[in-house]
Amino acid sequence: MSWVLETSEVRKTYRMGSTDLEVLKGVSLGIAAGETVAIMGPSGAGKSTLLHILGGLDRPTAGRVMLEGQDLYALPPPARNAIRAERIGFVFQGFHLLPELDIVENVMVPALIRTGGWRRRTVERRRAEDLLDRVGLAARRGHRPTELSGGEQQRVALARALMNGPDVVLADEPTGNLDTHTGFQVLDCLFELTSDRHHTLIMVTHNEQVAARCRRTIRMVDGLIAVPG
Ligand SMILES: Nc1ncnc2c1ncn2[C@@H]1O[C@H](COP(=O)(O)OP(=O)(O)O)[C@@H](O)[C@H]1O
Ligand SMILES: [Mg+2]
């Protein structure tokens, strides 16, 4: 089996004063291209830590993370950052939009990071506008994030996550700050956008109904995978 994302024996330890807190205790998993995977488990189980490690944001204390056959943490940081910008899209629980930028510019930010500037501004702008159309926000183009509802802001964040056409989308409780109805609207958008282009989707959620929409569910308890899905 070839995996788009694979971990072997990933561990993460935080040093707290004179004691070590082992947050991930040897996580091994493989995720195939185009899969949709939910990660569930109690608060503190290590879900966010794992997601950050999968996305190249946080170095594990031990173990390996392979993204499309490349050992992410064996790469020098600039190469890892470049791969992350091209291949991975992130969606967080708090939308993390930049308040000074309008929503089109917010969606364009990953392109800026990838290319190191606004070089092909018109091409990038058109793509950002297309993505905003697809999440139902065509009419809000000139608006700033603070002028939008939470659900709308999260849809902007979805568009931003897809700006660079990532292979993998990582979402950490993307509906955690939204009411049930709005949350489901955002999820509809997320599943539509990701299945259209066969992105791989890995989503942390506390909601069984949300998890049921994914092809499989990985359950984590206390830094370990309890049920591999
Ligand atoms: N930077 C950090 N320093 C110390 N402890 C941390 C840090 N980040 C997370 N932790 C601890 O690691 C554990 C797992 O956290 P997290 O991955 O956020 O869990 P989850 O997302 O499953 O709720 C928690 O006990 C948390 O307090
Ligand atoms: Mg978390």
Image (spheres, grey):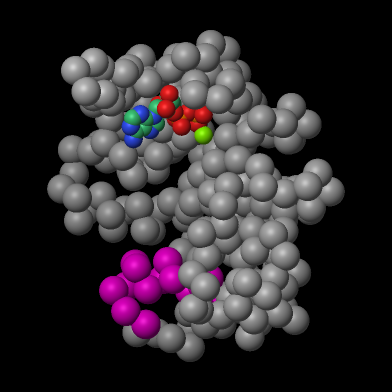
Task: Check the image and name the residue furthest to the top.
Answer: 226
Residue numbers of the magenta segment: 104-118
Residue 86 visible (yes or no): yes
Judge by depth and name the residue closer to the eye, 68 or 106.
106
Residue 29: give x, y in percent of width and height: 44, 22
Q: Position of residue 160 (x, y in %)?
A: 53, 64
- Residue 106 is covered by the magenta coloring: yes
**In the image, residue 187 above or below residue 48:** below
Left or right position of 115 against 206: left
Q: Position of residue 108 (x, y in %)?
A: 48, 74
Along the viewing direction, whichever of 114 and 46 lies nearer the viewer: 46
Give left or right: position of 215 versus 228.
Answer: right
The N terminus: image quadrant: top left
Q: Residue at coordinates 58% horizontally, 47% vertically from top-left? A: 93
Q: Which residue occupies the extreme bottom position in the image?
A: 122
Q: Between residues 223 and 74, which one lies in front from this camera angle? A: 223
> Total marks drawn?
0
**Can residue 37 be seen at all in this image of the molecule?**
no
| Residue 102 relative to residue 111: left or right | right
What secondary structure characterizes most of the magenta part?
helix
Occupied quadrant, residue 39: top right
